[in-house]
Amino acid sequence: MKLEVVVIPVSDVDRAKRFYARLGWRLDADFAVGESFRVVQFTPPGSPASVHFGEGLTSAEPGTASTTYLVVSDIETARAELLAKGAEVSEVFHRAGPGQPPIQGRDPEGRSYVSFATFSDPDGNSWLLQEITNRFPGRIEAAATSFASVSDLAAALGRAAAAHSEHEKRDGGRHDENWPDWYASYMVAEASGKELPL
């Protein structure tokens, strides 16, 4: 079972369509059936799940979708990209722990799951960007490891390269002929939250 679609309530379908298109989300569908039903589907870059809005989809009041999470690998870059596309995005903040008040800036230790920024669509449906670079164990199946974008893959390769450099130092500085296998093992373990190779 996989999450496929989240429905968000909007008051002006065409305005919402322009907003999400401007963010660079992929328009998958826009169709109507009669005068009282219309569905528009967008998918955020790299996401397996999509967003629906339109007419006749939900009885929820426009703007009541609250803090729907969008996972990013670099919170500062994601915020800058959204700002460049015209979204009003909060400053980056982090939390010292669950339920703790927000603290300005990215988590100084760079921990996953604790750095955030928020933005809203024109109706006030709010989105929460959450930086995740290393998943908790068991959160992603190793066989399903994938990267949402070129920048996510590049960031994962960079982390693997830094870890591999330390691996070679521990191994007496010898060149590791099997480095592609080591990188692959590291990247899959990191993405799926498994123990990282040394």
Image: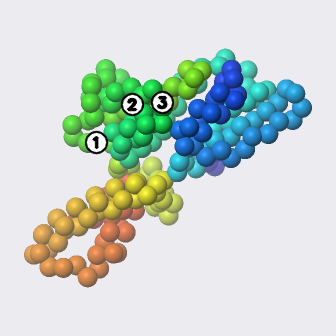
Q: Indicate the quadrant containing the C terminus: top left, top right, bottom left or bottom right.
A: bottom left
Q: Where residue 12 is drawn, which disc sits there?
A: none
Quarter residue 6 falls in:
top right
| Furthest residue toward left | 172
| Amino acid under disc 3 | Ala
The residue indicated by pointer 3 is 87
Nearer to us in this view, 185 or 82: 82
What kind of element bears circle 1? Answer: loop
Question: Separation of disc 1 and disc 2 at Cα?
Answer: 15 Å
Nearer to us in this view, 24 or 173: 24
Residue name at image x 77 percent, y 27 percent = 55
Dot 1 or dot 3: first in sequence order is 3
The reply to whether residue 132 is visible in this rendering is no
| Amino acid under disc 1 | Arg
Few, some or many residues within 10 Å of mark 3 (<14, 14–19, 20+): some
Residue name at image x 83 percent, y 36 percent = 32
The residue indicated by pointer 2 is 117
Nearer to us in this view, 92 or 115: 92
What kind of element bears circle 2? Answer: strand
The residue indicated by pointer 1 is 111
- Which one is closest to the eye, mark 1 or mark 2? 2
| Furthest residue toward right | 34
| Amino acid under disc 2 | Ala
Dot 2 or dot 3: first in sequence order is 3
Dot 1 or dot 2: first in sequence order is 1
